Image (cartoon, rainbow, N blue to C red):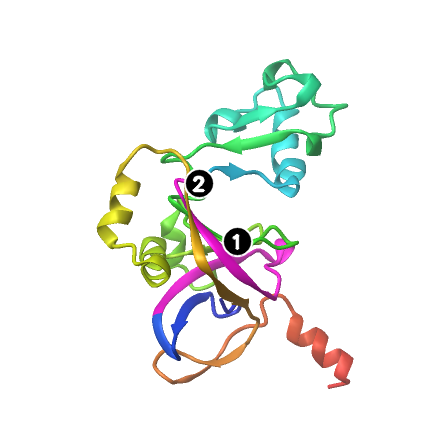
Amino acid sequence: ANIPEFRVRIIQREKRVFSERSIVGKVSHKTPVFSDRMEWVEIHPVWYIPNSIKVHDILPSLRRPTSSVMQRYNLKVNCGAYGSNYKKINWNPVDIRNCSFTQPPGRASVLGDFKFKFPNKYSVYMHDTHKPALFRNVRRSYSHGCIRVKQPRRMAEILLDHDKGMTSKQLGRILDGPQKPHKEDFNKPVPVHITYFTTYFDDNGNFQTSSDLYGHDRQLARVMGL
């Protein structure tokens, strides 16, 4: 996944077998650069909301008497001793980071139908989206750090077929079945590289340049005295 290019590829035996548009983190929520190993795919995933979104997005909304964030995203909350009825919780003294917020699978799920997990210290992963229209835009930095992938079903088909011979029909039966979380572990984890190259060759072999989205190149140039 090359961040400035807004693109995700799967390479198998030096051959490109998948190449699609991606959405990456905003400048204020940068997608990190690192390598890891993808260990499983979740179908109809649950969204476990990270602390950054709890603190900066959900909490300010809940402190307003007219808040509709819980209904709008069909969120469930468990605040331990404070309970699970968000309307009866005084959100001013509560440390919302100690509360668990989840969104179940469904049409409104921000994760869509697929989540591709490679556990890491950044809590970053790849997933589907409920806003596919954003893939039409050229500059696609909208997320809180995770990477959204266009055509995630095709990506899942390639990975699951390669790892365990799962067919498209088998995957389709899971998708068309009950909307409950389903996990497919890989027998052999898949290497994942999240890179930051502002110069690259595209899928047609043409040399391209991208804008320095996060300013990493400018920072490197300053350190090198360029």
Name the residue nearer the viewer: 41 or 56.
Answer: 41
Magenta-colored span:
18-44
Q: Secondary structure at mark 1?
A: loop
Mark sitting on residue 125: 1
Q: Quadrant of the C terminus?
A: bottom right
Classified by dominant secondary structure, the portion drawn in magenta counts as: strand
Residue at image coords 63%, 36%: 54
Around disc 2, counting alpha carbons within 10 Å, would you say few (fewer than 14), some (14 to 19), or many (20 or more)?
A: many
Magenta run includes residue 127: no
Around disc 1, counting alpha carbons within 10 Å, would you say few (fewer than 14), some (14 to 19), or many (20 or more)?
A: some
Q: Residue furthest front?
A: 187
Residue at image coords 51%, 65%: 192
Q: Is residue 89 above or below residue 213?
A: above
Amino acid at circle 2: Pro
Question: To which quarter of the image does residue 58 belong?
Answer: top right
Magenta run includes residue 30: yes
Task: Point out the tag, 1 or 2, that comes first from the N-terminus.
Answer: 2
Q: Is residue 153 left or right of residue 65?
A: left
Residue at image coords 71%, 77%: 220
Mark sitting on residue 45: 2
Mark 1 vs mark 2, CA separation in Å: 12 Å
Provide residue 59's location: percent of width, then percent of height: 65, 31
Provide residue 57's location: percent of width, then percent of height: 61, 37
Q: Residue furthest top?
A: 88
